[in-house]
Amino acid sequence: MIAAFATLAFLVAGWAALNAVAITSDDGGAKIIAALKGQSFASQSILLRPATVLFSPRYPVPRSQPVRATAEWRAAA
C-alpha cells in the first residue's frame, strides 16, 4: 500500500513539474524547438535595430602603451 501511495505521489510531483515548465516556457518553447532544429529563433521574429549606447568616462583614462615581450615572460607563459 505504501508503494502505491509513493508511486502516486511521484506521478503527481512529475505532473506538477511538467506544468511548471510548460507555464514558464510560453515563449521559450518556440526558442527551444528552433534550437533543436538548428535554426535561429531571432530570424523568425521581427528584426529590431541595435541600440546605440554612448559612453564617456568621468575622468580621462591614459592610453596604455604596448609592452614588448621579453624572453623571461615568454618562458613564464
Image (cartoon, grey):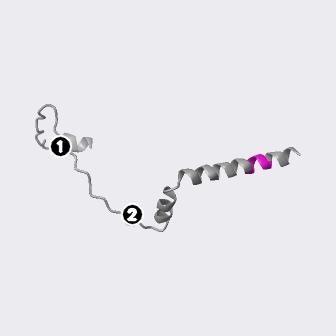
Q: Position of residue 36 (x, y in %)?
A: 49, 65
Disc 2 vs disc 1: which is toward the camera?
2
Looking at the image, tell me whether mark 2 or mark 1 is earlier in sequence order: 2
On screen, 24 above or below 76? below
The residue under the point 21% across, 41% down is 73
Q: Which residue is mark 1?
A: 71
User: Which region is colored magenta?
Assistant: 7-11
Q: Main secondary structure of the magenta part?
A: helix
The disc labelled 2 sits on which kind of residue? Ser
The secondary structure type at the circle numbered 2 is: loop
Between 46 and 29, the one lying in front of the other is: 46
Q: Along the horizontal axis of the image, is 41 left or right of 72?
A: right
The secondary structure type at the circle numbered 1 is: helix
Q: Along the horizontal axis of the image, is 69 left or right of 41?
A: left
> Are there few (<14), some (14-19), or many (20+) residues within 10 Å of tag 2?
few
The disc labelled 1 sits on which kind of residue? Ala
The residue under the point 40% across, 66% down is 44
The residues bearing labels 2 and 1 have C-alpha atoms spaced at a distance of: 53 Å
**Which label number is shown at residue 45?**
2
Q: Position of residue 58 (x, y in %)?
A: 16, 32
